[in-house]
Image (spheres, helix red, strand yellow):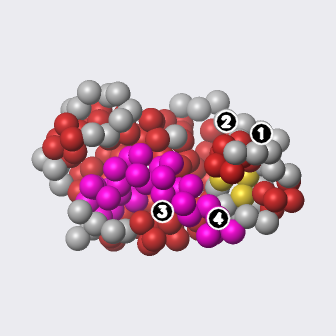
Amino acid sequence: MNKNYDHCLEMLLEHEGGFVNHPDDPGGITNLGVTKKVYEEWVEREVSEQEMRDLTKEEVAPIYKRNYWDRCKCNSLDSGVDFSIFDWAVNSGTGRAAKALQRIVGATEDGAIGPATLALVSNHSPEDLIEEIYSQRQMFYESLGTFDTFGRGWSRRNKETMQASLEMMD
């Protein structure tokens, strides 16, 4: 349906930022939003902290494409809906983002977006989907025990994602 990956990746990387290793973040060492564990799985070997510090956009782009964008079938979603799902998938897992979309459209919540989910998605306006994804995501964040630590940033990211998604609608 669309080819927004490059644009969505640019916006996503603004949210993800650079190198971090926050003691309260279960992801541990992370750069450009890619955790050390995810990067090690991608390159099929252990990596050093310095390698993580040196990651580039070119190195992480294919990880985001295959592990998140493609897994959530973002190319089959309307402009804006694709970014809302992609950003949430990266931040909280593809299964969580997919199940939320399925819940919103009345599909079976199995965490795998397929033809049945996409057919139901097509019955909803992109604007309504984006706004409901925002609401579901915010409720999820507020339910987490680490909301006091990370909630302000998550809420800002969620709101920025919704606003950017609404601006992207065809």
| Discs 2, 1 touching: Cβ within 8 Å | yes
| Discs 3, 2 touching: Cβ within 8 Å | no
Bounds of the magenta segment: 56-84
Amino acid, disc 1: Asp
Instruction: List the residue tagged with mark 3.
Output: 160
10 Å neighbourhood of mark 4: few (<14), some, or many (≥20)? Answer: few
Q: Say which of marks 4 and 2 sits in front.
A: 4
Q: Say which of marks 2 and 1 sits in front.
A: 1
Instruction: List the residue tagged with mark 1.
Output: 24
Residue 98 in percent (x, y) is at 38, 39
Q: Residue at x 52, y 71 (%)?
A: 10
In primary-sequence order, the first of circles 3 and 2 is 2
For the residue labelled by badge 2, is the local secondary structure a helix, a strand or a loop? loop
Would you say residue 12 sits in the magenta stretch? no
Q: Residue at x 72, y 58 (%)?
A: 31
| Furthest residue toward left | 123
Number of the label disc, if any, that sits on residue 146: 2
In primary-sequence order, the first of circles 4 and 3 is 4
10 Å neighbourhood of mark 1: few (<14), some, or many (≥20)? Answer: few
Q: Work out how far the residue at label 1 is from the one at label 4, CA to CA, in angstroms.
A: 26 Å
Residue 40 in percent (x, y) is at 72, 46
Judging depth in this view, the residue of 107 and 162 nearest the camera is 107
| Furthest residue toward front | 44
Number of the label disc, if any, that sits on residue 59: 4
Amino acid, disc 2: Thr
For the residue labelled by badge 1, is the local secondary structure a helix, a strand or a loop? loop
In primary-sequence order, the first of circles 1 and 3 is 1
In primary-sequence order, the first of circles 1 and 4 is 1
Left or right? Give the position of 19 relative to 125. right
